[in-house]
Image (cartoon, rainbow, N blue to C red):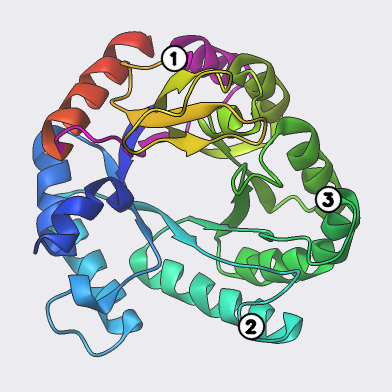
Amino acid sequence: MKFGVSAYSFNRLLKAGKNYFEVCDLAKEMGYEGIEFIDLNLEYGCGEASVQELAQAIFAHCEKIGLPVIAYTVGADFLNGRGCSAEEEVQRIKDCVDVAQILGAKILRHDIFWKLEGLRSWKEAADRTADAIRQVTEYAAEKGIVTCSENHGLIMQDSERMEYMMNRVHHENYGWLVDIGNFMCADEDPQHAVGIAAPYAVHVHVKDFLFKKGAEDMPEGRWLTTRGGNYLRGTVVGHGVVPVRPCLNILKRAGYDGYVSVEFEGAEEVLPALEQALKYLQRVAV
């Protein structure tokens, strides 16, 4: 396994004035072997005129410093669109595939949907979105890019639902971005869930959480509420309750040998947290 980091982990630094190129330098200096990006934002570039131009500049910089771009992650909603028709949403994500190609990324991760919008069943929503997802992955396959969706967004966050989605799309170029920590947002045991997800894994995110039962008062601070009413707060990988080591072992036994990418969502200082996360992963993923 190789260890990467999401530019999302540097959000506080980006908002404070860092740019994408500086973030890449920081990741390389810490020892990460790759970096991924989420919905490129021109505000975090250096005056580029378009997302495509920014992607080309990032690719050139990462090639110069020896830090590959391992994935491009974009928001999507194939059920309700994002202010556009379903056909327009498919085209928009195909355009994102083109950006991933410019970045040199071999993985494009997109959402499935966020709200049921009057439907009673997640399964019905999955059925309605499968064809659009298949269209995107067929386009991406022509460019040598694998597409995937993440257990993410509360509705499609647990293993049963995501496995259904994998088999409903049923395309060899479409897989699962397995986020080890996100299963807890649906109150599912990560070890159980990763055992189901592992055969479909094409990319992996690792994060960690502090946990409190919903029977207690919600603590102050940056906590979120799970589907079942419990409380989670992001923390440094290795400091929380997510069973990272056994989950990585499950993935390895299933034959996964790709990148494990850190997503840091905690309140701790960013750079020390990411340094500690990498050291932890290097220690436990053996």
Q: Earlier in the sequence, mark 1 or mark 3?
A: 3
Compared across the picture, whether 22 is left or right of 172 comes to left
Q: Residue at x 37, y 62 (%)?
A: 104
Q: Amino acid at mark 2?
A: Gln
State yes or no: residue 159 in magenta: no
Q: Which residue was labeled with disc 3?
A: 122
- Image quarter (top left, top right, bottom left or bottom right) of the C terminus: top left
Give 210 or 177, whichever is nearer the viewer.
210
The image shows residue 165 at horizontal and vertical percentages of 79, 47
Q: Give the distance between the C-alpha atoms of the residues marked 2 and 3, in whole angstroms.
A: 24 Å
On the question of residue 207 being in view, the answer is no
Q: Residue at x 82, y 54 (%)?
A: 169
Q: Residue at x 56, y 69 (%)?
A: 143
Q: Amino acid at mark 1?
A: Val
Point out which mark residue 128 bears. Answer: none
Q: Which residue was labeled with disc 1?
A: 241
Circle 2 or circle 3, nearest the eye: 3
Q: Which residue was labeled with disc 2?
A: 91
The image shows residue 219 at horizontal and vertical percentages of 38, 28
The image shows residue 248 at horizontal and vertical percentages of 49, 18
